[in-house]
Image: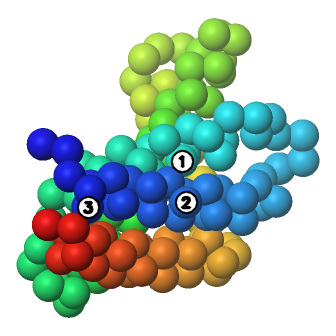
Amino acid sequence: MPTFAKLVSGIAFALVAMFASSVFIPLLPEGTQVGMLIPLNSFIGFLCGWLVLGRMVGKGYYSAAGTGVRTSCTLLFFALLLWSCYEMIVLSTRLRYDGPMQALTDMMAMIVEYGLLMGTDMQGPIILLVGGILSGFLAEWSAERFA
């Protein structure tokens, strides 16, 4: 059921994803196409905020902070999964893999590679952590205020 707290959660996490993605872009190798990176990650952030954080509001600010961090981790996982799956499909259309297991194994390796690449600069993880906590507080406040 749509609520104002779910909408606030979705918008807040779309903004968190947008800022984290804009910090991640300079870390990518030179010549990487990043045209849809920010819009798709923002959409994933909106969905994670709506579905994960939005349904957990109303349990207090301490719980909201933990749920915000949980939602940030969910956002990071699904963003890494989406982009490594996209890269795997691009490579498989160029016939780089001998079979589907090699493609899936390479996709998992790309998830780890992109995760480690994001961890080289601490701005991205800090944005996800602080943004998740602040989004949790904002969602909890909106649930109390507009319930």
Foreground label between 2 and 3: 3
Task: Decide if residue 84 is on the left or right side of residue 44.
Answer: right
Q: Taking the image as drawn, is residue 75 in sight?
A: no
User: Which is more N-terminal, label 3 or label 2?
Assistant: 3
Query: Residue pushed farthest right?
Result: 30
Type of amino acid under label 1: Ser
Could you say whether the residue bearing mark 3 is in a helix, strand or loop? helix
Could you say whether the residue bearing mark 1 is in a helix, strand or loop? helix
Tell me which corner region of the image, top left, top right, bottom left or bottom right, holds residue 96: top right
- Percent coordinates x, y for residue 71 in the rendering: 32, 63
Numbered circle sitting on residue 42:
1
Residue at 82%, 40% (x, y): give it: 32
Residue 17, placed above or below residue 34: below
Q: Cα distance, mark 1 to mark 3?
A: 18 Å
Type of amino acid under label 2: Leu
Tell me which corner region of the image, top left, top right, bottom left or bottom right, holds residue 104: top left
Q: Identify the residue under disc 3.
A: 5
Q: Identify the residue under disc 2.
A: 15
Q: Taking the image as drawn, is residue 23 in sight?
A: yes
Task: Report the quarter where the N terminus lies.
Answer: top left
Could you say whether the residue bearing mark 2 is in a helix, strand or loop? helix
Task: Report the quarter where the C terminus lies.
Answer: bottom left
Residue at 76%, 39% (x, y): give it: 34
User: Which is more N-terminal, label 3 or label 1?
Assistant: 3
- Percent coordinates x, y for residue 7 in the rendering: 33, 53
Type of amino acid under label 3: Ala
Residue at 61%, 63% (x, y): give it: 20
Foreground label between 1 and 3: 3
